[in-house]
Image: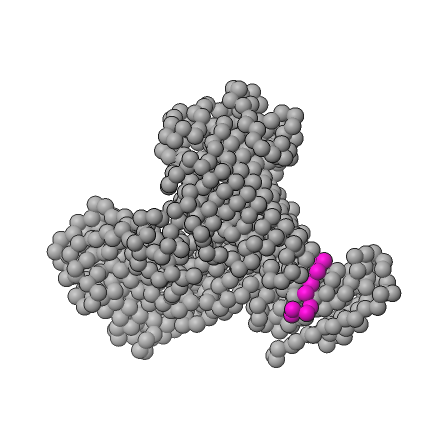
Amino acid sequence: MKKIFVVIGVLLMAASCNKKEVSKSIFVKNIKELNNAITNVKQGEEIVLANGIWKNAEIKFFALGAKDAPITLRAETPGKVFIEGKSSLHLGGQYLVVDGLYFRNGYSPENGVIRFMINTDSIAHNTRVTNTVIDGFTRPNKWENDRWIEFYGRHNQLDHSYIAGKSNDGETLRVFFTGNENIKNHHQIIHNYFGPRPRKGGPRAETIRVGDSKTRFAPGYVNVSNNYFEACNGEVEIISDKTNYNSFTNNIFYKCEGSLVLRHSNYATVNANIFIGGDDSNFYGGIRAVNTGHWITNNYFYKIKGEEFRSPLAVMNGIPMTPLNRYKQVADVVVAYNTWVDCKSPWQIGVGQNTASAGVLPPSEVRSAAPIRSIIANNIIYNTKEDAAPVVNHDKMDGILFKNNILDNNGKAFTEFGVLKNETIKMKQINNWLFVPEDTQNDSLNEVYYGFDFKLITADLFGVDRSKSNKIGAAITIAAAKNFRINKKNYGPDWFSTESKNVAPNILTASSKKGELAKIIAEAKSGDIIHLTDTLYTINTALSINKDVTISSKRENKVQLLFTGDSNTSAFKMHPKGSLHLNNLSITSKTKQLAFAPLKENMASAYKLYINNCMLSNFKYVLQATKGSFADTINIQNTTIKNCENGIVLTAEEKGDYNAEMVTINKCTFKNIDKNVLYFYRGGYDESTIGGNLKVTNSVFENCGSKEKSGTMLKTPGIINVTLMGNTFQNNPVKLVALLWGEKNNHHSTNKVLNSGLIKVEEQHKLDILY
């Protein structure tokens, strides 16, 4: 179907109807009727889109409503009008309402799925988008940049909407400040459900960005409040605040692998937010402070275990005379009345200090300016298990005044730096994540420090008046905590369910009959398990994996898969959202092609690969990444990989992006791999990109690297987190087993290196600057 462009212009007379109620409903069934209806719509009227699929609809909706008589564009039934294909909704004018639309199965062909601007002459003001869903409306290629929601103008609002599944380059929502008509905008982003955003593998994947470095001095007054953020894992910054006087209050961050970051902003209010993590990830983040004048108050953190840039509280070092796009020194920041429970090293001061890297970085990248004129007061750190380092000092802390902060470290005192009072606090566990001090306590909780303007902190986390009975920490009373509930139904549209159904997997069988395995995979549902019943399967075309599927031998011995595909084809072709589990198989290439490869284009989403108790042999590449492809997880256990030209090659990206997040190799054997045994690459210096992650443990590497021109067997340039532990490297004709980046989180221990060169640690690596 051809693209359908809807260009809507409305000229309304000043004498138009000014009633609050809808004066007329115009029902439309197709694009032509929609175009005609909005051309003639008047103040106070509504246009109703008929239920069904509206495909390839690029809607440009310009109209001039009134405060008491807005113009509404709504679904006949909320959630029953599906916007699909190459579609978008761009808004211009004033006092418009959009209600009940569902964007799915497509993407916007231009920037902005929903955009509060048609062009620079048609900007939306006083316009509301509500009760709407954008789910998986992502571009086909991960490297293509766009935003889903673009705010321009003033006094616009997004509320009670569900936004999830963006996997390509670019922020999910961005507020623009280009021009006077877009500053002091008082936009409202409230009562929304920001659902999962998968790991992207690089920068430019924030869920919300408010401004940018070029407009960092602009006043915003943007309000981001009462939203629910779940698994917003796109990158290290969930929210990146880059303008001034913005507010972030009463939001829930549930298991998000990133932080609320005050990146270029000044005078932000960060109040009464709840950050819930867990033991299942060391990447859950909290709040990161940069720049001037922020008030960080009444926030609650549970099991937030990120480090440095993802710390529960990260107070950064700045750069003297910083360029616009870098880090300004922290000054005049207040951190008061917050509570951290079972968080790992919750306070990290001087994060990003990198003076040791001055020899490989330009002066504009050296963060040597420690925080000044700031206060951390009236906070609680409570641990049910001892934390060895509740406070980490990366540089200097003498510019911060610490007053009346209490630590209960499960009986283990922490006296370093002298910034915490060691006490025993009786805590009441309200639910599985909320702990509040008992009402009967020792006097230490009542010893509140009152700094300048602290009287403006009038209520606690749950809205209890602090003027009547003030205490240290985020919550004052148990009663208010007991009455608090997180009800996910309060966020997003009331017609849309975020609950997923657990479906038991089907157990399927496939014989070695020609084409049967491919047919069974195609017909399987996500989560199904396929048992192979014969001993030998010949595969002459790639098996496409576009769902979660397990392929396993039904026999005790390994089933053999012989791949006889054409040149440059792979035995398994990984598609977006494909998740492949292989168990107890022997996979061999007759023609020395690829074992695994993602699509060469249209890899909109990540794939996952799990290999256990298998043998892979005679391949040209075990895995070769393609540009724009991204593996969330590559997990190889108890597997032998032998007689291959190349091993695992993840090198198709540049400028801070990378091709995999979590790569784990455990109890494996690599034998006779000619070159690129493991080549995992992240290019460029970008301190906000803190991946990927490689663990190689308890494995054996023998006679590998005979044709390795670099002289290094395991190559990990630019990868931040690398662990080599308990491995044996023997008879590998290379100069280096690995060259690790000592200044980052690269470690090795208990490895045996026999006739294989050595493992070298180089503290500083010189990389290209990305920005």
Quadrant of the image occupied by residue 55: bottom right
Q: Relative to the observer, which residue lies in front, 337 or 381? A: 337
Q: Left or right of 606: which side holds 150?
A: right
Residue 337 shows in this picture: yes
Q: How is the image coloured?
A: one colour
The part of the chain drawn in magenta is: 119-128
Q: Which quarter shows the C terminus?
A: bottom left
Q: Residue at x 69, y 74 (%)?
A: 7
Q: Which quarter shows the N terminus?
A: bottom right
Q: Residue at x 63, y 35 (%)?
A: 456
Quadrant of the image occupied by residue 480: top right
> Is 122 contained in the magenta span?
yes
Seen from this angle, which residue lies furthest bottom? 2
Q: Relative to the observer, which residue lies in front, 747 or 394? A: 394
Q: Relative to the observer, which residue lies in front, 709 or 79? A: 709
x and y percentages locating residue 600 in the rendered image: 40, 72
* Count of marks overlaid on the render: 0
x and y percentages locating residue 173 in the rendered image: 57, 58
Q: Residue at x 50, y 47 (%)?
A: 291
Q: Left or right of 654: which side holds 644?
A: left
Dominant secondary structure of the residues highlighted in magenta in the image? strand
Q: Residue at x 69, y 55 (%)?
A: 155
Residue 258 shows in this picture: no
Is the residue 443 above or below the residue 764 in the image?
Answer: above
x and y percentages locating residue 688 in the rendered image: 43, 54
